[in-house]
């Protein structure tokens, strides 16, 4: 996607949520998305997959609420 320029085009706003030690979606992928295209919002949590903390889901829900 990066080589084709897809990431640099217009896209819907998105919230990027990642765990700092996520093995499924490495943190470098989040930084790559932030470096290309329109600005996004990002939240990095401690831990692994999606950074499962008590604040993870409320952060996502708050973002969705602000979009509507």
Image (cartoon, grey):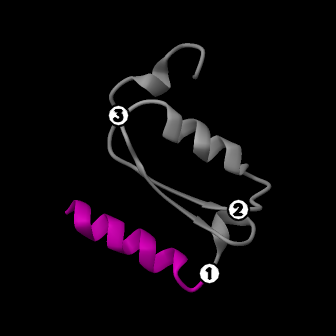
Q: Which residue is mark 2?
A: 20
Residue range in magenta is 53-68
Q: Which residue is mark 3?
A: 11
Q: Nearer the viewer, residue 36 or 52?
A: 36
Q: Nearer the viewer, residue 25 or 43?
A: 43
Lower sequence index among marks 2 and 1 = 2
Classify 10 Å Cα crowding around label 1: few (below 14), some (14-19), many (20 and above): few
Q: Nearer the viewer, residue 11 or 42?
A: 42
Q: Quadrant of the C terminus?
A: bottom left
45, above or below 18, in the image: below
Q: Which residue is mark 1?
A: 53
For discs 2 and 3, the disc positioned in front in the rendered view:
2
Q: Quadrant of residue 3?
A: top right
Is residue 63 one of those drawn in magenta? yes
Residue 13 pos. (x, y %) = 33, 46
Residue 61 pos. (x, y %) = 38, 73
């Amino acid at each position: 996607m990066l080589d084709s320029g897809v990431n640099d085009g217009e896209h819907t706003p998105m919230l990027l949520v990642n765990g700092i030690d996520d093995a499924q979606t490495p943190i470098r992928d989040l930084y790559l998305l932030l470096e290309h295209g329109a600005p996004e919002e990002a939240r990095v949590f401690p831990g692994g997959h999606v950074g499962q903390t008590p604040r993870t889901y409320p952060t996502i829900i708050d973002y969705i609420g602000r979009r509507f």
